Amino acid sequence: MPYVKPLAAPKPARRPYPSDLSDAEWLLLEPLLPQPRPRGQPRIHPRRELIDAILYALGEGIKWRALPHEFPAWPTVYAYFRDWQDDGTWKRLHDALLAADRETSGRTPEAMAATTAPSVRPGASRVPSGRSAAASAGRRSRCSASGTSRPEATG
């Protein structure tokens, strides 16, 4: 992205959206985010604004291009979202927050799998090979309704 010189005066504070992080939530997330690289261009947008914009877009289910103008430009927000997805930041955030939530509820921080067995119930019938699920359930498929093995072309 091209370098954009920061504004001389800071932007006026915007009204918070319901999807914005609280101060307590930000204190949990901030140390988990990647630190700025020692070289390169300085960051123009605060990471909290970027996180708020990402949470707004994902929470509201809008297109990236439809981000409100109070947030950083949508290509910048999407680039951070994509970079953090590629480098595993979102997985680290999820795992750390899940462990913290489990600890506060009195459980072990690591989730344990209940079973490692296949999820097929004993005695459950399987669909015989060569038959569709509809045919094995007693319903007629489109092909079997006419009594043929495949649909006939009409023309």
Image (cartoon, grey):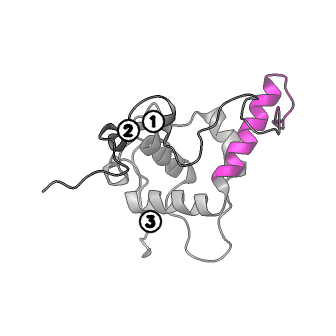
Q: Nearer the viewer, residue 69 or 59?
A: 59
Q: Secondary structure at mark 3?
A: loop
Whether residue 81 is in magenta: the answer is no
Residue at 81% from the left image edge and 36% from the top image edge: 113
Does residue 73 appear in this view? no
Residue under pointer 2: 141
Report the Cα–Cα distance between label 2 and label 3: 64 Å
**Residue flagged by tag 2: what amino acid is it?**
Ser
Secondary structure, mark 2, is loop
Q: Quadrant of the N terminus?
A: bottom left
Label 1: how many Cα within 10 Å (few below 14, some 14–19, many 20+): few
Q: Position of residue 21 (x, y in %)?
A: 56, 37
Q: Residues within 10 Å of mark 3 (few under 14, many from 20)?
A: few
Indicate left or right for 133 with 69 as reference.
right
Real-space Cα separation, disc 2 to disc 1, in angstroms: 6 Å
* Residue at the disc numbered 1: 134
Do the residues under discs 2 and 1 have CB atoms within 8 angstroms?
yes
The amino acid marked with disc number 3 is Pro
**Left or right, residue 41 beside residue 143:** right
Earlier along the polypeptide chain: callout 2 or callout 3?
Answer: 3
Residue on which disc 3 sits:
6
Give the magenta range: 90-114
